[in-house]
Image (cartoon, rainbow, N blue to C red):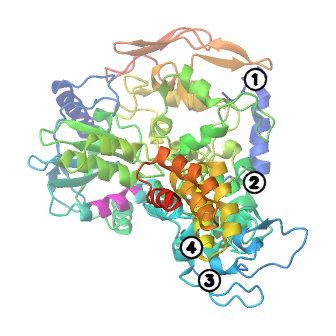
């Protein structure tokens, strides 16, 4: 996973904190973004573009001068109107689109007319698109454009390969948001190899390998819902996280620093010193999450939990990286009938009992 | 937490333990699929009280939510729509919210979502703790025997589809195989060699209709180069035969009939060349 290292020097927690402050407030991603429904559609040329070095793509019938395939006359100078409706004409050859457009989720511009996005004659773009794909899509999807343009952390999937079509089918799909597959299946198309490096220079996880080796999966992973935590079009938080989460191993506790986790989890699991209901990680009523996190060098969630998948229950990791060389220190968590215990090396062996109402440990 | 709430929490935990709930089961942390749930009577937002589960409905759906959370708003909106969709069917929906939230905040969220089903108040997060809920929003679905049939946390994509599918399966309106397709929808591809070949075949057919034999022949050959099909072989034969070249056309018709013995253009073409 992320190569977050536990620093032996006490003052180093100030560095990430300073970095966070300098970077300004990180934002939570909205669930929905603005889409301009009508005004800007049909803004792209459908007439033939004048020949030029950038006009690299041409429609077969147009190139061959077979105007009558679509138009009334086979006369380049005066082809007349098209013989049928636009989409009907296109489906005459591109008949697979009748089945594609029968899928449950349809892109409204594609239903309206193919020429909302395609120039039926020639184009500077592949697939005879009316403009460069990201430019064209974000012409309506303004909210996505804002995310892409303003993102401090960018996602290569937007700008490489098939761009928007890496993940979305712009015609119709069987999944909401016109996704080609469920988010996880799309993400692992790329994030399933070793050697990928993130924008911050850190190695990225080979998720196929990681999930194969670690069978206790975090709920969003099980649900194939990577977008529960990651903002796929670009964002302001490291690793494209949808909301803030401390970038460093240690961080002083404040609720808003964990907005990512609290997007689903109850903040009281961590923020209240006493509970008998909210978590099993308690000794009597003493909330041990609170104990670990509420310190000047508070342990962030990653100190004990693997985010995506682990070998142990509760997503508890087996070891933590320590020091500049990222030595692996064992957590040695053991599940017990009345709770559990952790043994050296983070601290001496300590057990907790969550089947009682009172704690045996002295309160600080 | 007040001592009364604490007592209630422990009564709830005891009640669930008495129902034989395993501690380490999946789904909710303390309740596994198939386990029978206790059915506490909880205070309702706005007054009165109601039970968590229905004794008569085929499907009892409950959702744990909280205010100040976009996902809860989306979940409640979705469930409000589904409740309308299943109106008149034996489906009962309730929402559960912690009493730790100000009532006005809860009311505001419920109003914004257009959620008209009962909202139950979980005093001291007792039910939350007893079931081992752990996250918001999350949906549980129980059958008439009050056994947990499905557990579905909110997801950004296809949440409504999944909840709808679960309800339909429980109502007997959908099969397990249909539900599997909801959980793993078919990949939405666009292009394929077969589709591309078909495209050139269609173009060839149109050109042939317009008596443009040369270009039609070119297009059908392109189609055959991508993916040979009976109609494409037959069309190529037809174009050649029409030009008087039955010698070249005959093996093409035969090729088409090898793939599809009922290919009508090939059958007619062979007859024509035999005359």
Q: Earlier in the sequence, mark 1 or mark 3?
A: 1
Of marks 1 and 2, which one's residue comes earlier in the chain? 1
The tally of labels here is 4
Q: Position of residue B26 (x, y in %)?
A: 35, 28
Q: Which mark is residue A109?
A: 4
State the CA–CA distance, disc 2 to disc 4: 22 Å
What are the residue bounds of the magenta stretch?
B75-82
Residue closest to the far left: B56
Residue receiving disc 3: A39
Q: From this viewpoint, is residue B250 visible?
A: yes
Q: Do the residues at discs 1 and 2 belong to one chain? A: yes
Q: Which mark is drawn over residue A163?
A: none
Foreground residue among B97 and B275:
B275
Q: Residue at x 53, y 67 (%)?
A: A107
Disc 4 and disc 3 in contact, CB within 8 angstroms: no
Q: Name the residue tied to disc 2.
A: A159
The secondary structure type at the circle numbered 2 is helix
- Along the line of sight, the residue nearer the viewer: B91 or A76: A76
**Which mark is first along the chain, 1 or 4?**
1
Looking at the image, residue A301 lies above or below residue B221: above
Badge 4 and badge 1 in a common chain: yes
Relative height, residue A19 to residue A66 (above, below): above
**For the stretch drawn in magenta, what is the main secondary structure?**
helix
Are the numbered discs 1 and 3 placed on the same chain, yes or no? yes
Which of the two residues, A200 or A180, is positioned nearer the viewer here? A180
Task: Tell me how far mark 2 sits from mark 3, CA to CA.
Answer: 26 Å
Crowd around label 2: few <14 · some 14–19 · many ≥20 (10 Å): some
Which residue bears the numbered disc 1? Answer: A7
Badge 4 element = helix
Labels 2 and 3 touching (C-beta < 8 A): no
């Amino acid at each position: 996973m992320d190569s977050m290292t536990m620093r032996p020097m006490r003052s180093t927690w100030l560095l990430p904190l300073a970095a966070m402050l300098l970077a300004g407030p990180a934002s939570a991603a909205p669930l929905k973004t603005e889409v301009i429904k009508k005004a800007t559609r049909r803004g792209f040329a459908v007439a033939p573009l004048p020949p030029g070095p950038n006009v690299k793509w041409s429609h077969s019938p147009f190139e061959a001068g077979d105007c009558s395939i679509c138009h009334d006359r086979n006369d380049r100078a005066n082809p007349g109107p098209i013989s049928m409706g636009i989409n009907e004409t296109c489906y005459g050859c591109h008949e697979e689109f009748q089945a594609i457009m029968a899928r449950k989720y349809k892109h409204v511009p594609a239903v309206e007319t193919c020429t909302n996005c395609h120039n039926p004659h020639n184009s500077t773009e592949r697939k005879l698109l009316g403009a460069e794909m990201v430019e064209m899509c974000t012409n309506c999807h303004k909210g996505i454009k804002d995310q892409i343009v303003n993102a401090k952390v960018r996602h290569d999937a937007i700008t490489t390969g098939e761009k928007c079509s890496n993940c979305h089918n712009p015609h119709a799909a069987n999944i909401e948001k016109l996704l080609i597959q469920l988010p996880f299946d799309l993400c692992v198309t790329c994030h399933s190899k070793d050697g990928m490096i993130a924008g911050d220079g850190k190695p990225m996880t080979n998720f196929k390998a990681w999930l194969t080796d670690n069978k206790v999966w975090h709920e969003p992973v099980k649900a194939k819902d990577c977008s529960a935590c990651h903002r796929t079009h670009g964002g302001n938080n490291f690793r494209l996280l949808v909301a803030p989460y401390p970038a460093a191993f240690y961080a002083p506790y404040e609720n808003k620093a964990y907005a990512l986790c609290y997007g689903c989890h109850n903040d009281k699991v961590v923020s209240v010193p006493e509970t008998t209901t909210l978590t099993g990680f308690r000794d009597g009523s003493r909330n041990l999450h609170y104990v670990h996190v509420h310190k000047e060098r508070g342990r962030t969630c990653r100190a004990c939990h693997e985010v995506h998948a682990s070998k142990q229950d509760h997503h508890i990791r087996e070891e933590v990286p320590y020091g500049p060389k990222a030595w692996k220190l064992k957590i040695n968590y053991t599940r017990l009938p009345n709770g559990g215990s952790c043994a050296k090396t983070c601290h001496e062996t300590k057990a907790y009992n969550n089947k009682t109402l009172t704690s045996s440990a002295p309160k600080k | 937490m007040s001592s009364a709430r604490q007592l209630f929490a422990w009564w709830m935990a005891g009640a669930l333990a008495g129902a034989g709930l395993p501690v380490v089961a999946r789904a909710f942390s303390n309740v596994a699929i198939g386990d029978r749930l206790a059915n506490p009577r909880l205070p309702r937002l706005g007054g009165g009280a109601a039970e968590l589960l229905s004794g008569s409905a085929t499907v009892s759906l409950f959702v744990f939510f909280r205010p100040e959370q976009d996902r809860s708003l989306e979940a409640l909106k979705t469930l409000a729509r589904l409740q309308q969709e299943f109106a008149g069917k034996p489906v009962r929906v309730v929402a559960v919210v912690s009493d730790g939230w100000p009532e006005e905040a809860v009311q505001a969220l419920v109003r914004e979502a257009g959620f008209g089903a009962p909202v139950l108040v979980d005093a001291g997060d007792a039910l939350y703790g007893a079931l081992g809920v752990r996250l918001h929003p999350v949906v549980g679905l129980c059958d008439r025997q009050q056994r947990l049939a499905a557990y579905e946390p909110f997801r950004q994509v296809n949440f409504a589809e999944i909840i709808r599918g679960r309800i339909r399966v429980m109502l007997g309106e959908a099969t397990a195989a249909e539900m599997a397709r909801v959980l793993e929808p078919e990949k939405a591809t666009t292009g394929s060699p077969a589709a591309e070949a078909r495209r050139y075949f269609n173009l060839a057919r149109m050109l042939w209709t317009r008596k443009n034999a040369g270009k039609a022949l070119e297009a059908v050959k392109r189609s055959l180069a991508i993916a040979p099909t009976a109609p494409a072989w037959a069309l190529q034969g037809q174009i050649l035969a029409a030009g008087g070249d039955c010698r070249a056309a005959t093996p093409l018709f035969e090729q088409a009939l090898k793939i599809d013995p009922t290919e009508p253009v090939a059958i007619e073409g062979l007859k024509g060349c035999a005359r």
